[in-house]
Amino acid sequence: MPPWPEPVTLTGTHARLEPLSAAHAPGLVEAARDGELWQLWYTAVPSPDGMAAEIERRLGLQAKGSMLPFTVWDAEGRIAGMTTYMNIDAANRRVEIGSTWYARRVQRTPLNTECKLMLLRHAFESLDCIAVEFRTHRLNTQSRRAIERLGAQLDGMLRSHQRMADGTLRDTAVYSITAAEWPTIKTHLAWQLARPR
């Protein structure tokens, strides 16, 4: 049986998602340095020194069938960050879109919306998913607002769900989009991308 989901390249106007490769490390280091994202306490962005280990970790999870990691490229052909399908449940046709981070220069641009549109379209229209999840720290208000702008619904809060690197406990906000909701969400995201900026 081939892996589910199989590696794929997804291409849009503002972004391109390619299967993660160790060869992408220099560009990912440069992207993480833009904004010193690893210093944000409420999320886990690899530091420049930890980038190779993070790539290896994600590719290891891909080999086990629990993650499909992508490198995010911007419209100029520069590496802008990472995203993944994770917590893959092939039997129930569910994935989570997560472990996402972007260089500061592409934050608050159409890139994130288009990445989510491409990943959701592939999940629902090619992989026949029944639902797609999003999870984030309860206190990561920027991430929560971005997830809610997609049209995802809050399923609930996993309290004291994970221990953070600094020893604090993370409450995880869990959101989802179901297959029945996808046609409306798709129209909404396409409208967001078409609006003048």
Image: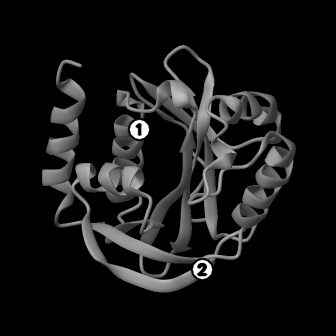
Q: Where is residue 37 in the image (x, y as percent from the top left)?
A: 63, 42
How crowded pointer 1 is (Cα within 10 Å; few <14, some 14-19, many 20+) is rated as some
The quadrant of the picture occupied by the N terminus is bottom right
Disc 1 to disc 2: CB gap under 8 Å: no
Q: Quadrant of residue 65?
A: bottom right
Number of marks drawn: 2
Residue flagged by tag 2: what amino acid is it? Gln
Question: In the visual, does 67 lie left or right of 142?
Answer: right
Question: In the visual, does 77 lie left or right of 22?
Answer: left
Q: Position of residue 89 (x, y in %)?
A: 51, 77
The quadrant of the picture occupied by the C terminus is top left
How crowded pointer 2 is (Cα within 10 Å; few <14, some 14-19, many 20+) is rated as some
Residue flagged by tag 1: what amino acid is it? Asn
Picture disc at residue 145: none
Q: Mark 2 — residue?
A: 162
How far apart are labels 1 and 2 at the CA level?
25 Å
Q: Position of residue 134 (x, y in %)?
A: 41, 64
- Comparing labels 1 and 2, the label whose residue is closer to the camera: 2
Note whether residue 125 is visible.
Answer: no
Q: Mark 1 — residue?
A: 112
Colour theme: one colour
Q: Position of residue 97 (x, y in %)?
A: 47, 58
Q: Identify the mark nearer the N-term, 1 or 2.
A: 1
- Determine whether 74 is above or below 178 in the image: above
